[in-house]
């Protein structure tokens, strides 16, 4: 499939979930070749200094490089900048990095040779995945360290994952000889942040869908009221996410005997009554973040930018990750709130009110029921609060002051993914708790949809009375909802 046909977040998601191989369009190939030929002609002229082509890098930008050393300059760049540390970047994110780097280079403003882009395409198509490390990028001069590790195997160096992705091994030798600017084009750019961000968005989309479903289940388990979800209150405060959430909750509860029975209580706590306002706000953030990332994955983010038709090579700052850093922090906060309000619903279902036994056990005292499941959820919520301290408000001067303001977007990206993984854990506890609570409403039934969900959970986890190692049951549910 021609990569030029993939523009949206969903396009990329569908491509990654398929076995389709990618290729460049003829138009992209011509743009790449034209730009490369133009850059080589400028280098041959040798009249002016071009950053990263015949100069050093960072604060060494005023150091001219001899024409005989230009190829070695690019190799040295990738080797020296491959200084990442920490955990391995997940395989699916590495594959996304390859895809997104190809996409950025395909616009013909980076000066690379066609063979280099084709090598990246081969790595993607045949799942040759470089070993990349989580730590090392400041998110400003591009994701230098992680992209350097991604690029080393292109020149026959560094490490790659084995065919079964179980161990790492040395990269195979390569016939690729880098030309002027190619090392810089490969390691400049925001593809590490982009790939993590897309992974976060894919996960966030599922979390938000589950949030409404689980909330609806909790509402009936708690014998909640219908009024907060009727359209009348929402059309007079018409935030899109709020309207969507109220409508979705009512759809999930459609036909519920529990919802339609008379209530002794006048109002529900906020964690039930304000689901449209809280979930809806997070949905609105999701769409905002997705919009920014959609712009970024269709952009050129290396430096300098090459414009053959205008006879310009411009040293600018498209590698700076600030647009992504702010959005990643925003997304982490928005999804953490989904976990926070879910934990409050867990708490309410365990407090021994609304005709539910304390901690959802028929033998409280001898048995502790789900007491510690709520502790665990509270612990995770607390950790997420710490993780949601924005990375984008920080900056540390680097490269002898040449790079004096950085985005820390890479840290925002890896941190955001941890927050989302934590919310998945909270949602697993919420689903366990809500299903177990709803069983106490028998013989009065919830909606067909929610009763079916309870039955599915009962097939994969033991939610019956009597104390057990609840961690095992929660893990089964997490595996179920995360697939």
Image (cartoon, rainbow, N blue to C red):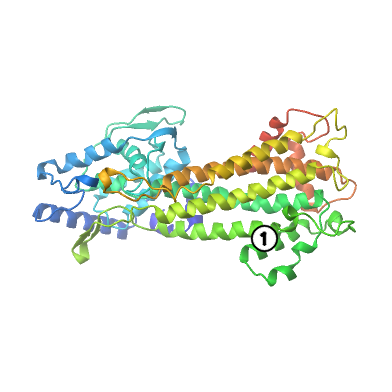
Which residue does the numbered mark 1 point to in the structure image?
Answer: 277
Q: Is residue 413 left or right of residue 46?
A: right
Q: Position of residue 287 (x, y in %)?
A: 54, 60
Whether residue 394 appears in this view of the structure is: yes
Q: Position of residue 170 (x, y in %)?
A: 34, 28
Whether residue 483 appears in this view of the structure is: no
Q: Position of residue 338 (x, y in %)?
A: 64, 50
- Nearest the viewer among 319 and 20 is 319
Label 1 SS: helix
Q: Position of residue 362 (x, y in %)?
A: 87, 35
Q: Residue at x 44, y 57 (%)?
A: 6
Q: Residues within 10 Å of mark 1 (few under 14, many from 20)?
A: some
- Nearest the viewer among 415 and 401 is 401
Q: In this figure, what is the number of numbered marks?
A: 1
Residue 239 occupies which quadrant of the picture?
bottom right
Q: Is residue 62 left or right of residue 274?
A: left
Q: Residue at x 62, y 41 (%)?
A: 382
Quarter placement of the C terminus:
top right
Residue 107 occupies which quadrant of the picture?
bottom left
Q: Residue at x 18, y 39 (%)?
A: 72
Q: Is residue 112 left or right of residue 2?
A: left
């Amino acid at each position: 499939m021609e990569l030029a046909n993939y523009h949206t977040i969903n396009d990329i998601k569908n491509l990654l979930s398929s076995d389709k191989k990618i290729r460049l369009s003829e138009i992209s190939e011509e743009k790449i070749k034209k730009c490369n030929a133009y850059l080589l002609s400028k280098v041959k002229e040798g009249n002016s200094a071009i950053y990263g082509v015949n100069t050093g890098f960072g604060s060494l930008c005023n150091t001219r490089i001899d024409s005989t050393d230009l190829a070695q300059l690019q190799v040295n760049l990738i080797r020296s900048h491959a200084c990442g540390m920490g955990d391995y970047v997940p395989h699916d994110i590495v594959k996304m990095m390859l895809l997104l780097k190809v996409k950025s280079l395909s616009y013909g403003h980076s000066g690379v040779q066609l063979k280099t882009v084709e090598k990246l395409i081969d790595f993607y198509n045949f799942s040759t995945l470089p070993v990349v490390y989580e730590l090392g990028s400041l998110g400003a001069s591009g994701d230098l360290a992680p992209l350097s590790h991604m690029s080393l195997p292109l020149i026959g160096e560094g490490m790659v994952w084995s065919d079964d992705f179980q161990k790492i091994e040395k990269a195979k030798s390569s016939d690729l000889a880098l030309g002027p600017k190619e090392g810089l084009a490969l390691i400049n750019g925001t593809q590490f942040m982009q790939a993590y961000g897309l992974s976060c968005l894919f996960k966030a989309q599922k979390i938000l869908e589950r949030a409404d479903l689980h909330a609806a289940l909790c509402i009936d388990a708690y014998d909640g009221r219908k009024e907060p979800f009727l359209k009348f209150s929402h059309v007079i405060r018409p935030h899109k996410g709020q309207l969507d959430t109220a409508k979705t909750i009512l759809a999930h509860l459609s036909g519920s005997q529990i919802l339609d029975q008379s209530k002794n209580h006048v109002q529900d706590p906020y964690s039930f009554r304000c689901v449209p306002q809280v979930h809806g706000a997070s949905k609105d953030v999701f769409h905002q973040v997705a919009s920014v990332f959609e712009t970024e994955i269709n952009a050129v983010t290396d430096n300098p930018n090459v414009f053959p038709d205008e006879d310009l090579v411009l040293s600018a700052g498209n590698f700076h990750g600030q647009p992504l850093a702010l959005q990643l922090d925003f997304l982490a906060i928005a999804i953490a709130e989904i976990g926070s309000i879910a934990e409050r619903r867990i708490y309410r279902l365990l407090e021994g009110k609304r005709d539910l036994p304390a901690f959802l056990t028929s033998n409280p005292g001898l048995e502790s029921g789900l007491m510690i499941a709520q502790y665990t959820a509270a612990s995770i919520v607390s950790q997420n609060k710490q993780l949601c301290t924005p990375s984008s408000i920080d900056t540390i001067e680097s490269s002898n002051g040449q790079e004096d303001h950085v985005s820390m977007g890479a840290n925002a990206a890896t941190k955001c993914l941890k927050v989302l993984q934590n919310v998945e854990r909270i949602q697993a506890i919420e689903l366990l708790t809500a299903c177990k609570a709803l069983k106490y409403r028998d013989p009065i039934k919830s909606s067909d949809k929610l009763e079916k969900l309870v039955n599915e959970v009962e097939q994969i986890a033991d939610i019956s009375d009597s104390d057990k190692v609840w961690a095992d049951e929660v893990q089964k549910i997490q595996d179920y909802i995360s697939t």
